[in-house]
Amino acid sequence: MAEESKKRIRRSAEQRLADLEKKHAEIMERQRAAIARIDEQKKRLMQAPSVRKDKVEQEKRFARAAYALAPEWDQRHFIAAIELALAEDSETLQNRGEKLLEEHGKPRRGRRPAKI
């Protein structure tokens, strides 16, 4: 018998646990790298001209609705109102906000007089 068969070496629980922890760390590192790539793609998409245009339009709608609802308020009033609103149910606030934006956030139609 020139060839001897290899015997199976039984690993201890500590060795198996160390291997599992190593495998877990490798998987977590791959996931972090994948998430970083996804975040980078998301960041690039958020800088696209069409997204910026939509964002500017949303800001304009917000400003129009805010002025229509409370023309005498300034930023301090809005910050205080936001702080008070944080105590409310977010789903209810979101639904109400969408309704108010739809109602007051649209630009006025027709020709506007020239500003002097």
Image (spheres, rainbow, N blue to C red):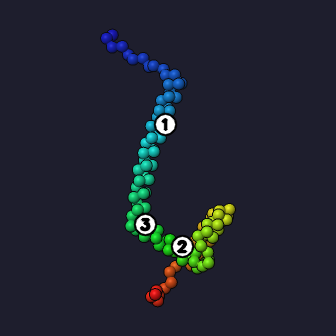
Q: Estimate the spatial distance between the alpha carbons at disc 2 and disc 3, rounded to whole Å.
A: 16 Å
Would you say residue 105 is visible in this rendering? Answer: no
Name the side, left or right, on which 20 lies relative to 4: right
Which residue is denoted by mark 2 in the rendering?
62
Query: Where residue 91 sits: x, y (%)?
Result: 62, 64
Query: Where residue 48 sits: x, y (%)?
Result: 39, 64
Q: What's the residue type where badge 1 is placed?
A: His
Q: Nearer the viewer, mark 1 or mark 3?
A: 3
Q: Secondary structure at mark 3?
A: helix
Query: Where residue 85 sits: x, y (%)?
Result: 65, 65
Q: What's the residue type where badge 2 is placed?
A: Phe
Q: Looking at this view, is 71 or 9 the one in front?
A: 71
Q: What's the residue type where badge 3 is placed?
A: Val
Q: Earlier in the sequence, mark 2 or mark 1?
A: 1
Q: Nearer the viewer, mark 2 or mark 1?
A: 2
Q: Earlier in the sequence, mark 2 or mark 3?
A: 3
Query: Where residue 15 sits: x, y (%)?
Result: 50, 25
Q: Secondary structure at mark 1?
A: helix
Residue 51 marker: 3
